[in-house]
Image (cartoon, helix red, strand yellow):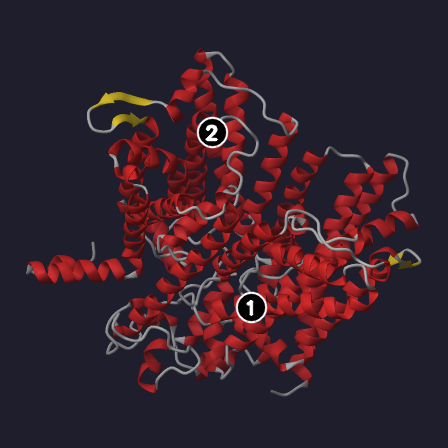
Amino acid sequence: MTAATELRPSVGQRLAGLARTLISPRGAVFLLLVVLLVAIAALNPSFAEPSQFIRFIQRVAPVAIVAIGQYFVIVGGEFDLSMGSVVTAQVVIAGNLIGQDEAKALPVLALMLGFGALIGLVNGLIVSFLKVPSFIVTLGMMLALLGAVLYWTGGAATGNPADGFREIGRGGIRGIPVIDILPWSVVILVVVLALAVWFAKRPFGRTIIALGDNPTTARFSGTRSWWVKTSTFMISSLSATVAGVLLVGYAGVHPSVGRGYEFTAITAVVLGGVVLGGGRGWVVAAAAGAFALEALFTLLNFAGVPSTYRDAVQGAIIILAVAYSATTFRARRRGRALEAPAGQSPGTPPPQAAPETSPASGAKTDDSPETPATPAPIPSTQRADNETKGGS
Amino acid sequence: MSAATPAARRRRGRLDSSLIVGIALVVVIAIGAILVATVGRNFFSPGNIRDILTGMSVLGFVAIGQTLVVLCASLDLSVLYVISLSSLIAADLMAGNPANIPLALAASLGVAALIGLANGLIVTKLKVNGFIATLGTGLIIKGFLDSNYKGTSGDVPMEFRLIGATGLGPVPVSTILMLAVAELVWLFLGRTRTGHHIYAVGGNEQVARLSGIRTARPVIAAHVLCSMSAALAGLLLASRSGVGNPTFGAQGGYDLLSIAAVVLGGTLLLGGRGSVWGTIGGVAIFAVVDNVMSVMQVNPFLKDVVRGIVIVAAVAVYASRSVERRRPRFDAGGAPPAPAAASPAAVDPAATTEGAAR
């Protein structure tokens, strides 16, 4: 994963490297996930059975897919608050247009994908060309789309798609030896995740990260920012569409399906160590963030915590997780790795660290303190690691 | 810093951004008046004006506080639950007895200040992004509200209800109070050291720190004041309805709407530029649009569609223009060419990038 782990020769050092990755912000989410899963299994041993566990993955699949879509937007330096409404809209479209006619399933599916791409296109074009902050654009889209859907349905649950279509969300390949049933959702999640990993490794995916890290350098190096930005919004809307298709089968048709998904997705992505404001993060960690969040809910459920306190615990965990990753990241950037005390007051940097920490460009290079702010001539966005950009 | 010229320039810059919002507001009012006239009603009747001003006051309180936080390049999503919590605390403590009003006011504002302090400390000391920090504290408060309150609670005495019910002519008292708070915040931002520091830290935290500002304090102050003004909104809602209600905030969707109003008012979401009066203009645009739709009896679901389009369209109309025309705040303060010549390259390109990125 990191260069450090690959270069170390001996097994012991390799393990140490792995351990360091696990407690680093990048790997912390995986550690958190494992701890949560072990805790759940301890409380409820049947959870660890393969058939139960695959059900858990099935339940997480829509959230994880939405989080993967949100990852691309966030790592590109923007927000997408319209995802929840897109999920709702797609669920309602499926419910109303497919009806009991199985033959309509494919055309309507194509329509839904087209609609999802269109929403993303509109979001992206407004952000790129009208220079409206993405927070505002997608907030407006969220209100408008939800209002339109509720107006269409009259605010009540209407329509019920054919069972063949709902099979995608609730059915699966039966008769598999160990896990009994392999739900389609899990298959789709794996495919989406594989696609996302592949896409993030491609030059285009790296351009998204470059754009999120520093729009100016990305522009200087010849990026068509508007197209990169727009495509991230299209990816996120399409992933919301896929999640909507799964949720139709799993949760049924109701205008409240998908509500709050945008915040859940952002939370999951941030829990996965992706930095709001763009430029840093790993898509698999974002998906793992969704799993950790859902595992947390499951754990609270099994532990008998009253459902009303669930929000409070969720809030506390989010703050702690992000605070942990923020403070460790800062410690690392000062060239003093993890063993250094993390929480140093920002107001009083030690004198010898000053030339290195003062320009953000120096801090960004993430190397030894001897190199003084190498990329100083390249304009830097001069923001602290965790600062909201909200889109420019 | 020599006082006269920078102050004058800054005032002119502020006027510019407010002017754009003002023009947008006039356009919205004109269109609204024509639309209302087509259904045979008078937009400028005293009753209608009172409705608009009443609609402004609650969102106005929230948005004033939100302005301070957004100026620091942070966000506050917890206002929604602070509103509900303060209304409940006040209504419970008053319990129908006018003698308890001061205590109730102090308690709810105090609790709100503590929440704001927590937000500010999490943002500045733990370095958690404002979006996530306040989302988290908001969820914590939501958990507390959901587990301790089953529904409306408390009883607000008549004396306190008068605040929400009376008016001077067509102008409700609540709106006057809201405008007074806006004036105070305007003075705070323009005349006090902390106010100037809020702009400085929001504009560029690194530069602010290198100029010797303790960057944490203005951010904490902004969060505390934001939560307190959200509490004022909650108190106003309590005085209007006579009870405290754990769903006051969620019903209004005040978290996102207040941010939208702030941005509508010409404040940059990135921080560092904007004004309170612009925000009031943004709130007024919302109130006028809502009022016109109510008078024309638009379907409530379609209202959301219109609201969403208005938010994006209004920001789009002046976003690109104001972004390019307004000069970076700190160029106005010190002579622009000086830092380029004097300071090391590391600081200067960053400043230009900020300008370009906006």
Instruction: Please report, as a chain letter, where disc 1 is located.
Output: B
Q: Residue type at mark 2?
A: Ala
Closer-to-camera residue (A335/A308):
A308
How many numbered circles does the render carry?
Answer: 2
Closer-to-camera residue (B154/A212):
B154
A99 lies left or right of A245: right
Q: Mark 1 points at which residue?
A: B72
Q: Is mark 1 on a helix, strand or loop?
A: loop
Q: Where is residue B13 in the image (x, y as percent from the top left)?
A: 66, 70
Q: Where is residue A261 in the image (x, y as percent from the top left)?
A: 49, 42
The residue that appears at 23% across and 74% down in the rendered structure is A368
Residue A25, quarter of picture? bottom left
Is label 1 on the same chain as label 2? no
Q: Is residue A385 above or below residue A390?
A: below
A196 lies left or right of B162: left
Label 2, residues with CA under 10 Å away: few <14, some 14-19, many ≥20? some
Q: Name the residue under label 2.
A: A251
Q: Is residue A157 above or below residue A343?
A: above
Query: Disc 1 vs disc 2: Cβ atoms closer than 8 Å?
Result: no
Q: What element carries label 2?
A: helix
Q: Residue type at mark 1?
A: Cys
Q: Where is residue A329 in the image (x, y as percent from the top left)?
A: 33, 66
